[in-house]
Amino acid sequence: MKLLLLGSNGQLGQALLQQLHQPQQSQQERPQFQSLALSHTQLDITDSAALAAQMAAYRPDIVLNCAAWTNVDKAEQQSDSCFAVNAMAAGQLATLCQQHNSLLVQFSTDYVFDGTNNMPYTERHSTTPLNVYGRSKLAAEQLIQANCSKYLILRSSWLFSEYGHNFYRTMLRLAQQQLKLAEPLSVVNDQFGCPTYAGDLAAIVLQLLQRYQQQGSVAYGLYHLAGQPAVSWYQFAQAIFAVQQVPVSVMPLSSAQYAGAATRPANSALDCSKFCDTFGIVLPQWQAALNQLKQVII
């Protein structure tokens, strides 16, 4: 099967590439994919003509859309650009996948929820995003569901890895700065969610694609797929520093004290029971990923 990976330079794109390029133990355990990975500089998915031409030329069986606008605060000032990448391009991609009979794998976010629920969110809960980023990703979900019959929409959250810009790398960089200043590091302690290691997410996605390749189908639909358990940013930071043995003092900070342009949900923890029950896959604990990661050099 031919696989097209869009947004290959992002942290999830890089994690997927790493999984695809791992040495194969056997053809039965991990079938091979013919893959084409394109970064933003190689293909701007907001260029509708270029996107259509690429789909027509390559004719992929599977499209992994990792291309996304992920700067939540900047989206508040540049909403048109955010919607162009996250929503309109995803909608066109859905139409093209329908035309070419391609499976579309789209990655969405916990920020489609407003965070007022006391329990983890299921796929049945109402979506009322608080910020432009969340609204753009919700619009993408709706456009895909309306225009494509073969899709997997995977809502994940708090993605971290050794690649790109993310909370894990930011905390390690800021900790080194604060250690030099002999000052504590303040981290928000009243927003709760599910940290998700990009490598774990990529490995699970590849499992799904293997099933699709072997069976010719998969249980299409929208699913929550995130690391467990849910914690606050403050607790996540503490765990990072404990594993990395960084002796920085961490101080709790309220959302009201955090100067961010975008409003964020107080509790965006995701209930992943539907995914686990449907596919029989046990979600890994994010703490295990922290133990596997080596010290990141910033």
Image: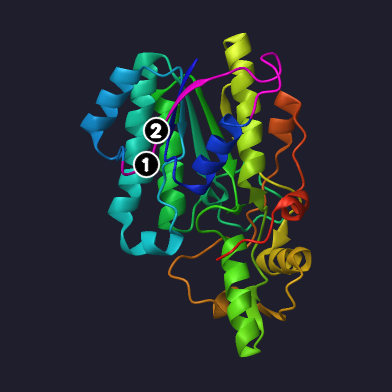
Indicate which disc, 1 or 2, sits on the residue closer to the N terminus.
Answer: 1
Q: CA distance from mark 1 to mark 2?
A: 8 Å
Q: Give the structural element (helix, strand or loop) at label 1.
A: helix
Magenta residue span: 23-41
Residue 280, horizontal then vertical, whole percent: 76, 26
Q: Residue at x 39, y 44 (%)?
A: 86
Q: Residues within 10 Å of mark 2 (few under 14, many from 20)?
A: many
Residue 127 percent location from the top left of the image: 53, 46
Label 2's element?
Answer: helix
User: CB under 8 Å between callouts 1 and 2?
Assistant: yes
The residue most toward the bottom is 182
User: Residue 33 appears at what percent x and percent y?
Assistant: 53, 20
Q: Amino acid at mark 2?
A: Leu
* Residue type, label 1: Ala
Residue occupied by mark 1: 87
In this view, 65 is above or below 186: above
**Which numbered dot is residue 143?**
2
Q: What x and y, as percent, mark residue 141?
A: 46, 36
Question: Is-magenta flag for residue 29?
Answer: yes
Q: Is residue 195 found left or right of 216 in the rendered image?
A: right
Q: Residue at x 42, y 46 (%)?
A: 68
Q: Is 273 drawn above or below residue 113 in the view shown?
A: above
Residue at 71% across, 56% down: 118
Picture quadrant where residue 144 is located: top left
* Picture layout, residue 38 above or below residue 263: above
Q: What quarter of the picture does the C terminus occupy?
A: bottom right
- Residue 2 colored in magenta in the image: no
